[in-house]
Image: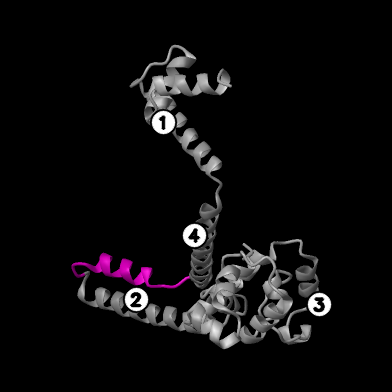
Amino acid sequence: MKLTMGEKIKDMRVERHMTTKQLAQATGISEPVLNGLENDLGRDVGYSRIVDLAKFFEVPTDYLLGFTESRITKNIELKELGMSDRAIEVLLAKRQDNELLSQLIEHAEFTNLINAIDIYVKQLAAKSINTINNLTAVVQRGVENYATGAGVPDGYGEAMNYINETKVDEDEFLRYRITERFNQILRDIYADNNAKVQEQVPPIISDTNDMTAHMIDVLDMVKAGTAQIETPDDAIRMMMERIGVSETEMQETIKSYFWDD
């Protein structure tokens, strides 16, 4: 989700462990103006001040103005990214959510995810896994030979089951590691985005969601036989009780809404 200019300025100030007073001293911009900017109240801020802030934080002015979400000022050659022409074309076409893609790449586990995929597709772990399985096979033969010479000891079946479980299925093992890392990234991004969405939900939507929840509760009560509804008024009355509104209050509200001047 895109940040406002004020949010960007505040984030960068906090990242540098600075107060607005310290930032004012460093940039020559008055503290009241900075407070207004951070609260998105500085509507008439001069471009020169935006330039001063961009220089101080070492970000493009376009970043503060909202034309880009990148803080990088250097003009990067596409070849420096090490991506294929087709991959670059896909990104430039913006047929996918590049903001979401950025969140994936920025996640702390993303590098580990790519490394796990690299190991899987290039079969880089095959030798190590084969070594583990070969050692397991040696132990298994040793146990079998002992059992043949000395008779089947107590716990033989349990020991063999344990040995068999230590064998590693390369494909299954690596895909599990990849899936777990990807799931962790998705969980974190979901939690982060969900928190931001909840902060921006208009009150009317929150109220509607609450009303829907109460309605579902009433229907569940009727289904379970713990409540009876014979008329629409009964349903409304139960809803109002759950919300904490008395019938008298509801009637007065309806009356004032429809009949009062």
- Crowd class of label 4 (few under 14; some 14 to 19; many from 20; radius 10 Å): few
Seen at 52% across and 81% down, the residue is 125
Q: Residue at x 38, y 78 (%)?
A: 136
- Of residue 102 and residue 66, the one placed in the foreground of this image is 66
Give x and y (percent) for residue 144. Answer: 31, 74
Q: Is residue 234 above or below residue 15?
A: above
SS type, badge 2: helix
Residue 137 or 21: which is nearer the viewer? 21
Residue under numbered circle 1:
217
Question: 31 or 225: nearer the eye?
Answer: 31
List x then y, in percent, for residue 108: 51, 75
Q: Nearer the viewer, mark 1 or mark 2?
A: 1
- State the residue position of label 2: 140
Find residue 6 and report its image quarter. Answer: bottom right
Identify the amino acid type marked 2.
Gln
Q: Are marks 3 and 1 in contact (CB under 8 Å)?
A: no
The residue under label 4 is which amino acid type?
A: Ala
**Quarter where residue 9 is shown:** bottom right
What distance separates the C-alpha of mark 3 from that of mark 1? 55 Å
Label 1 neighbour load within 10 Å: few <14, some 14-19, many 20+: some
Q: Secondary structure at mark 4?
A: helix
Numbered label attached to residue 85: 3
Q: Which residue is mark 4?
A: 191
* Residue 216 against residue 53 in the figure, above or below: above
